[in-house]
Image (cartoon, helix red, strand yellow):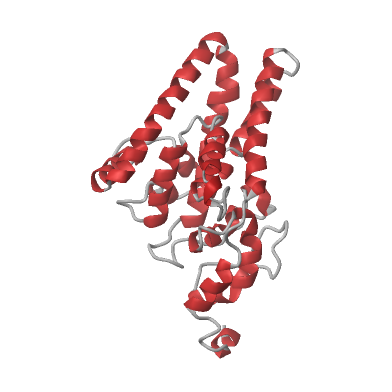
Amino acid sequence: MDQLAGDSQANLSIEEERKIARTFMGRIEWEMIVIGLGQVIVWVATWGLVVNNLIPLWGGFIIATVSTACAYLPSHAGQHGHLSGKHQNLDWLNTFISQISLIPLAQSHHILKATHMKHHAHTNDPRKDPDYRHSHVDNWLQSAIQIQNQTGEGGLIEVVEKLSKEDSKFAEALEKGGLVGFLFFFAQMTVAVIYPLETLLLWWVPRKLAVSYLGIIFSYEPHKDLPIGRYKDTRFWTNGLPRFINHSMQIHVMHHMYPRICHFDEPKAIEALKPFMIARGIPGAEKIPEKLRFNPTISI
C-alpha cells in the first residue's frame, strides 16, 4: 500500500483503469462457443450410450452431472455478448449458443439474461438482487438449498414479480423466455414417460446438483457478507483448488468490475489491473499472485 500511495494519482485514476480494461474487450470468445456446443454433444451422446446399453446408467449419471455443471458458463458469456465480441452482425451467436448450452439445465436464455442483468445492476441488494437469497447465507449447504427454493418471502419469485412491475422490458423478457421454459417442461415429461429412470439420473438429478453447485461458486463465494457498491460487492476467494475446477469464479471480481471482458481474458486483465484493485480496496486483491495460471488464485 505504501508503494501505491507513492504512485501518481494519474497512474491510478479511473480513466487510466478504464483505458487498460478496454484493451481486453471486444474479441469473439471462441473458447465458450466450443465449451457450449461440446458439453451439449457430450450430454446427448451420454443419453445415446446409456439407452443403447453401451455404458451403465451410473456411469452416464457421472458424465451427465459433470457436463451439466459446465452448461451455464457459455450461456453466461452469451448473456454478456462475449460470443459475438464487437461484431454486431454476429449477435445472434449469443442467443443461439447460450440457449443450446442450457439444454441440460432446462433453462431459458432470455430469463437467465434478464435476471442476471438485474443481479449486476443491484448486486447484494436484498430487495432487487435475484441472487441475494442464496448468496447471503451462512454456508454452502444453505446456499445449495436456497437456490432450489424460489418461493417464500424474499424468494426469487417475489423479487422477480417486484422487478417486473418496475421494468416493462424485464417483464417482456420473462414472458418471452416463458415459452422456452414450458417447452423444456413438456420435453422432460415426455421423455420421462419413455425413459423414466434415465430421465431421473441423466437430466433431473444432474440439473439439481449442477444448479446448487453453480449457486455456491457463482453467487455465495464471490458475494457473501459483502455490501452494495462497486469495488465492494465482490471478493477474491479460494478453496485451495486449481481455479478451473470452480470455473475460475475465484476471480469473479474482474467480471463485476468490467462485464465486457471475456471470461478467458480475465486473468491477464487482473494482472494488469492489480494495482488499481488494491487501491480501490477490493476484498482479497492484495493476495492475488503476480501471475494467474492454474493456481488457486490467492493464498490465505
Residue occupying the point 61% across, 60% down: 266
91 and 154: which is toward the camera: 91
User: Quick check: can you spot residue 299?
Assistant: no
161 and 300: which is toward the camera: 161
The image quadrant of residue 278 is: bottom right
Quadrant the C terminus occupies: bottom right
Instruction: Give the answer, above or below, for where 250 lies relative to 59.
Output: below
Q: From the top left corner, tell me how far across and down residue 16 is, in percent.
A: 53, 78
The image quadrant of residue 153 is: top left
Q: From the top left corner, tell me how far across and down residue 181 is, in percent.
A: 42, 28
Residue occupying the point 49% across, 19% down: 187
Quadrant the N terminus occupies: bottom right
22 and 43: which is toward the camera: 22
User: Quick check: can you spot residue 81?
Assistant: yes
Q: Is residue 272 left or right of residue 224?
A: right
Residue occupying the point 48% across, 50% down: 219
**Residue farthest to the right?**
54
Instruction: Give the answer, above or below, for where 293 lies relative to 220.
Output: below
Q: From the top left corner, tell me how far across and down residue 238 is, in percent.
A: 61, 57
**Residue farthest to the left?**
165
Instruction: Give the answer, above or below, for where 35 lies relative to 298.
Output: above
Q: From the top left corner, tell me how far across and down residue 241 is, in percent.
A: 68, 52
